[in-house]
Image (cartoon, helix red, strand yellow):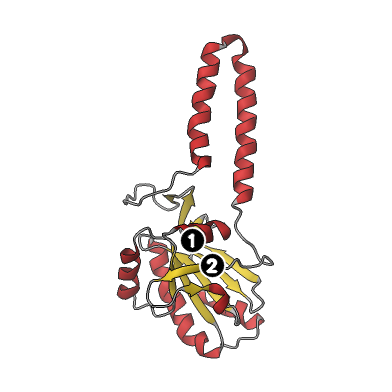
Amino acid sequence: MVGWLIVDGTYLSTINSSNSFNQPSTIKPSTLFWVIVPQIALFVTEVFPMNARKITAVLAVVMVLVALLVIQANAALKAGDKAPNFKLEAINGKEPINLTEFTNKPTLLVFWASWCPHCQNELPVVQRLYKELGPKGVNVVGVSVDRNINDARNVIKKLNITFPNGFAGTESGDRAISGYGIRGIPTVFVIGKDGVIKATYAGEADAGRLKDDFAKLGVKS
């Protein structure tokens, strides 16, 4: 995938692991699990050396099962799923971004961040689609997963982005990220006017394919 992975609030580059940046992350219970369980396993094997292999095997199975539950609980949405609503602080506007106010029309939704280079490639593509398809009945909404709203505003200003954007660096924003199962950015959703997701893209999405998706929804480019 061309983009960045988000794992339990920690951002991981899928392109170049040497990239560094200062982003606050939220340590979730699942993250603590992966830290604590190995320590418990080590302690148990030291106290009960005779049963070390058996106990370690059991703990390994438990870790795998919990991992599957975590992944399932935060699974990315797919075509056919209902798009969850969210209400976020506006980055480049005064009124809060409420998704239900946009899904009366086909909607293009993109999750992004200021520090993600692939997002900075994708945002101008989305802006051009906004200019081209907006007058033809398509809503476009962006959601920044930045933790500092000014970082997001600076990118929007730099790239001359005019479509509405919400800020997800809040508790309600965390719920939106979790609700959509965001595991990498940029992530793009094509949503029908019925509020159902029609297509999803992990990484940079091609403008031609997005136009084709909206054409299927009756929008002529």
Q: Nearer the viewer, residue 181 or 167?
A: 167
Q: Kindly identify which numbered label has been placed on residue 86.
A: 2
Q: Are marks 2 and 1 in contact (CB under 8 Å)?
A: yes
Residue 138, image x, y percentages = 55, 83
Q: Kindly identify which numbered label has been placed on residue 172.
A: 1
Q: Amino acid at mark 1?
A: Ser
Kindly state the secondary structure of the residue where label 1 is placed. helix
Q: Residues within 10 Å of mark 2 (few under 14, many from 20)?
A: some
- Rendered residue at 44%/62% (across/down): 168
Residue 128, image x, y percentages = 44, 81
Kindly state the secondary structure of the residue where label 2 is placed. loop
Residue 183, image x, y percentages = 52, 54
User: In the rendered image, is residue 170 in sight?
Assistant: yes
CA distance separating discs 2 and 1? 8 Å
Left or right of 166, for residue 48: right
Residue 141, image x, y percentages = 49, 74
